[in-house]
Amino acid sequence: MVDNDNNEELRIGVYICHCGSNIASTVTVPDVVEYAATLPNVVVAKEHKYMCSDPGQSMIKQDIRKYKLNRLVVGACTVSMHEPTFRAVLADEGVNPFFFEMANIREHSSWVHTHEKEAATLKAKEIVSSAVAKVSFSRPLEMFEVPVTRRALVIGGGIAGISAALDLADMRIPTYLVDKSPSIGGRMAQLDKTFPTMDCSICIEAPKMVDVGKSKYIELLTYSEIKEVEGYIGNFKVKVERKPRYVLEDRCTGCGLCADVCPISVPNFEFEEGLGPRKAIYVPLVQAVPAIYTIDRDACIECFKCVEACGALQAISFYEEPKIETLDVGAIIVATGLDMWDPAPIEEYGFGVYDNVATMMEIERLHCAGGPTVGNFVRPSDGKTPRTLGLIQCVGSRDKRYNEYCSGFCCMYTIKNALLLKWLYPEMDITIFRIDIRTPGKTYEEFYERARQAGIHFVQGRPAEIREDPVTKNLIVHVHNAALDRQMAYEFEMVGLATAAIPSAGVDELARALTVPLDTTGWFLESHPKLKPIDSSTEGIYLAGSAQGPKDIPQSVAQGSAAAGRAARVLNAGKWQIDPIVAYVDPTRCLNANPKSKCTMCAQACPYGAVINQPGTGNPSQIIPAKCHGCGTCVAECPANAITQWHFTDGQILAQVHALLAEKPEEKVLAFTCRWCSGLGADNAGVSHFQYPANTRNIMVMCSGRVDPDFVLEAFKLGAGAVLVSGCHVQDCHYITGRQKADARMEKLMTQLERMGITPGRFRTAEVSATEGAKWARIMTEMGEMVMEMGPEAIKAENEKLRPHLERQLKRVREGLDVSRVLDIFEARLQGVKTEIQQAYEREKL
Amino acid sequence: MVTHHDVLTWDLERCVGCQIGPRVCPKEAISHIDGVIENGRMVTKLLVDVDPDKCVFCGMCVEMCPMRAITLTLNGEPYNPVIEHEAFPKLLKSTKFNKDAFDFSLKDFVIENCSANVISYDAEYKMMRVDQEHCIRCRQCEVASNGAFEVQQPWQGTVLLRRELCVEGCFACADVCPTRALHIDENGQLVHADYYCIKCGACMQICPIQAEWEEYDVHFESQGVIYTRTHRRMTNADKLPVLVERWRVRHTPIQSAAWLEALARLADDKASQVEIDRKRAVHRRDLILALKGGKSRLKDHE
């Protein structure tokens, strides 16, 4: 059959992977191969134990030559895993790499229907058939090559950000290092000693901070915040707000005369956890880089004594205003770090109520020689050194009420603080209350052993309550001692809480600006938890240190360097290839070709301003490919069906709908998922082996904004049991507003369908994020069971009733590019295929 | 803060609700609480509330309080940061006692007469002692002792009492007046004895006829850029039964924008302008002296 633009004969090769036993143990692969061979235009169908292996790949390569294949379908795992691998195979053989489709029969079939072998095999067949249908209508596409700006941006000046910036500078890549506070250094600068070596923290970090300050390749933008990020890999435009310091950076020498004369002392929350004072004109720590003072206008009484003290330097300007700077960079490293959780919500521990209940960070500052007490460890109520100290672990972490995750490093830093205090005050009696002690690191367990030998007590049990003795201000800790299985009360002169690590304040806005998703607990989400732990799901943006999850110092340093490496890979390439999956306006169909038209739908739909929309001029709309991110929202919005998205044309998607609903459609649930959240969520369900019914089928688009109501209507017209449109949570949308547009559109569709008389629940929308595999499985189970409960007869009857409405609604569906061709072919085939299937069934029966 | 305990104590017994504190506060940390008048007499005086989150413990209100009701301590010791760092002047005020000129038979009368209860008799040295820290400089002792006490008041100004504008039968201001300058005479008339008045303005605050203010923008140029600040002025000065205008304050020489700002808030633009003009005049005089080869007086002065 000849049905592509070049009138070239379609020769499709289908290859099914066993993935060891991952697929083969559930799906009967030979059956799928046999079935695939019968599909239209399939020239060859084969299987292999590991298709991604070298032998697997060379088998495909040989076949391409031997059978003159011009389309390739591989039934294996998820697109995010091996799509690049097989595209490269095609490219090697001189075939356009976009003539490839992945059929995900692992995450979407074998792993989630482990106990339904037959149904899983049937599903695998249909997934392959859907991929064959889609690839039949593929067009050759060329990758865009974009120039790369050889500059990097590192967000966050903690140890991870510093490591990344220094490594980039060593590669002579000009780097901006942005920090929201007046000095770089981050959390590490606040620590006294580091475990397990007991190195002085600031002593080993300060030289690196100074190196950053001195490097001619690093431009420091402290006291600044990221406001807007535009662009794409290689070509980001970042707007940074420089908050006014009221001290001119080029004039201040950091002499400190101004702070001497300043009358106002306020608590230093930036660095000393509010335990020590700082002046209204200040540097947060003596080792600050840059050593430039900042005026805290909230505390300043405007006496201008500092202006007088500064004298001829004239570095102080009270009239400074926030400035916006625009940076052009090729890659971005996010190293925003962590904050410590405020334990005040745990009322039973009395933090903020009892004087002598402190957080571990406060304890850290109290025994630090550079801290507010110059290393004299005292308790806040009376300024005396406590003789007994209780340290409580897992405050706000591993706690279902607050943060379920383990912060990872608190065991170690609690032990470190205990050991340090034991060295400083051998008489001090220190008890650590723990759930478990976690020491997964080089020489960490030995460090724990050292603490036990030093005489620090470890009590297993999470304290239920702390009470204060109002006279002595001592604290009584009530705990169930698990070892003794007894309720016990301990009296301490001071109590420290090892609070959970939480994502740094303000990451929500930053994530939105970067369009990088956060996970359910608020940390930045990596592209793949095992294989791409440094990459975010946006190309050109990398994650380092605690931005991605709580980390200790060596991990942060390693990640900083790793991120620098990932970024340099792009920055040193000169040019970078990006996917050509962009939208295209058919000028002859665009309403604006008529000067009377005032259509602005596409421009409104586009979150990136990629549409040149000139209503009333007679110029049809145009899309700037370099600005288009390829979400496809405008395609679905276009009232004239004039826009299409390459690689996801209406025709291709409808071909998939037809292929998946060819047999027993009334028993099936058809789900449209976006590429990033729900698509990855469905993959996550697969990786986690969450089971759900096998009567479910997926079609992946780039964004839920791409889902045209016509697809849903067509699915129902074909007799689908139920349809789901699933995307990101609104705030996480990979394309900023795609999900929002989809929501509005789907709500309208929902009303329409309800009016037609559809049973509620047969059409649903959902928000599933990349980490919500369990939620995906739950929704699939609900819908799958609902369809089964309702029964095929009831659904068929309802669909017959809907049919006239649907046909009326779908009158214009053929107008889109490719669509009419696709539908003609499918409808023509329908009869033939149906009889063929009938014959096949009969043959089997015989 | 473990090493730095600032404590601001507001003695509400002494406070008369003059609202100088809230006015002078650069952080707007002090809010006022309305007083209550019933049947023309004061039931509760105006009071204040300090927001500890906004207070930066600068000490301006401490120095400016005419009733000496506020104390600030650092780690238990009295400490005033703005005075210590010369960001604020000390108000020039004193109460001197001339032992030789005093008729000691009047001692009980003088002690009785003191409106702030700060005078006591030291039997050992046969001396009258004044608690300088809490003296409000009302000059009652000066009159009662026939001039043996000599009081220097920091504030100068005028108080205009217009009984015809009063609310019928209201004597609330006489109730609040800390110095008995505003009092009810034998005829039941409200009178003002200006000599005792310390220009605190508590009378104006309790008065049922309140001053109305309008805000206006003042433009000024600095470093080549024009800036705008909002000042305020009274709009119903002619309708107030009692009007206190402060137009001069005696203080140690100082160079501080915070002080000028405080002055502008307490008096009006005129007062701070006078202050600046005075400085300019001194500088001009210095310059002329220097040109003649003379010595700078400003430096001597400071």
Image (cartoon, coloured by chain):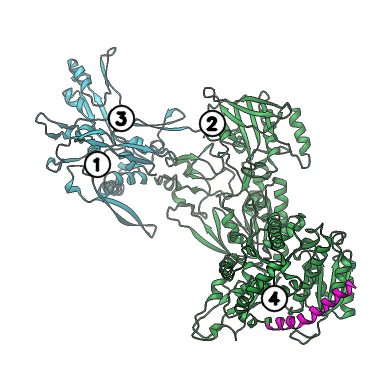
Chain colours: A green, B cyan
| The C terminus of chain A sits in image quarter | bottom right
Q: Residues within 10 Å of mark 4 (few under 14, many from 20)?
A: many
Which label was assigned to residue A532?
none
Point out the tag, 4 or 2, that comes first from the N-terminus.
2
The amino acid pointed to by label 2 is Tyr
Distance in Å between CA atoms under marks 1 and 4:
87 Å
Question: Mark 2 — on which chain does it sit?
Answer: A
* Main secondary structure type of the part rendered in magenta: helix
Which label was assigned to residue B14?
3
Distance in Å between CA atoms under marks 4 and 3:
85 Å
Question: Mark 1 — on which chain does it sit?
Answer: B
User: Could you tell me which secondary element the residue under label 2 belongs to?
Assistant: loop
User: Could you tell me which secondary element the residue under label 3 belongs to?
Assistant: loop
Say whether marks 2 and 3 touch (CB < 8 Å): no
Q: Where are the magenta residues, as a range?
A: A820-846
Residue that label 4 marks:
A654
Magenta stretch: includes residue A826: yes
Are labels 1 and 2 assigned to the same chain? Answer: no
Distance in Å between CA atoms under marks 1 and 2:
48 Å
Magenta stretch: includes residue B53: no
User: Could you tell me which secondary element the residue under label 4 belongs to?
Assistant: helix
Which label was assigned to residue B248?
1
Say whether marks 4 and 3 touch (CB < 8 Å): no
Q: Position of residue A756 (x, y in %)?
A: 58, 71
Residue shown at the point (82%, 76%) measured from the top left = A837
Q: Which is nearer the eye, A795 or A102? A: A795
Distance in Å between CA atoms under marks 2 and 3:
32 Å
Residue that label 2 marks:
A354
Distance in Å between CA atoms under marks 4 and 2:
66 Å
